[in-house]
Image (cartoon, rainbow, N blue to C red):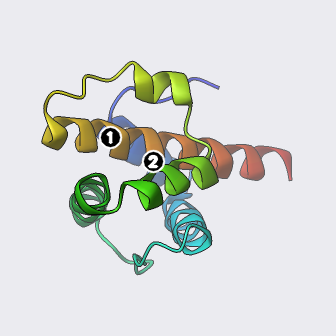
């Protein structure tokens, strides 16, 4: 599996495989498991998804760091990828982590679709 290198490529691939709604459902499932109050409607536009996810991750880093770490654990975001990010600018960091979250969720959806 070749992972997308940016948000636009990820959304394009999800739409091409008709898996965008499943990506939303997977996000909702994992955010609920992590006890983070964020649920996306299945019809959420990709631009809104990106903005809301970025905003939520930013707030978690700033205000609820333990919940942020728990979310990354529940979603199973690669620790080495998170550590490789530059943490000097929290706004940029939260954007990068948001993409890592989406990328990991996309892996889950893609594998479930391919092998079930």
Disc 1 and disc 2 in contact, CB within 8 angstroms: yes
Q: Quadrant of residue 65?
A: bottom left
Q: Nearer the viewer, residue 82 or 1?
A: 82
Q: Which residue is mark 2?
A: 102
Q: How many marks?
A: 2
Helix, strand or loop status at disc 1 = helix
Residue 20 locus on image (x, y percent): 49, 60
Q: Residues within 10 Å of mark 1 (few under 14, many from 20)?
A: some
Q: Residues within 10 Å of mark 2 (few under 14, many from 20)?
A: many
* Label 1 vs label 2, nearer the camera: 2
Horizontal side of residue 24 vs 108, given as left or right: left
Q: Which mark is residue 51?
A: none
Horizontal side of residue 95 vs 82, given as left or right: left
Helix, strand or loop status at disc 2 = helix
Picture residue at 56% right of the left edge, 75% below the top:
32
Q: Nearer the viewer, residue 47 or 19?
A: 47
Q: Nearer the viewer, residue 73 or 75?
A: 73
Residue 69 locus on image (x, y percent): 48, 49
Residue 43 locus on image (x, y percent): 38, 78
Q: Which mark is residue 7?
A: 1
On screen, 110 above or below 19? Answer: above
């Amino acid at each position: 599996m070749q992972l997308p290198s940016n948000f636009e490529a990820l959304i394009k691939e999800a739409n091409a495989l008709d898996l965008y709604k499943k990506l939303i459902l997977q996000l909702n499932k994992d955010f609920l498991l992590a006890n983070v109050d964020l649920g996306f409607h299945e019809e959420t536009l990709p631009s809104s998804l990106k903005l809301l996810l970025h905003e939520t991750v930013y707030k978690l880093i700033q205000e609820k760091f333990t919940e942020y770490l728990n979310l990354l654990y529940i979603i199973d975001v690669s620790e080495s990828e998170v550590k490789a990010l530059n943490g000097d600018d929290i706004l940029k960091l939260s954007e990068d982590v948001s993409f890592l979250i989406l990328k990991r969720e996309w892996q889950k959806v893609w594998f479930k679709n391919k092998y079930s």
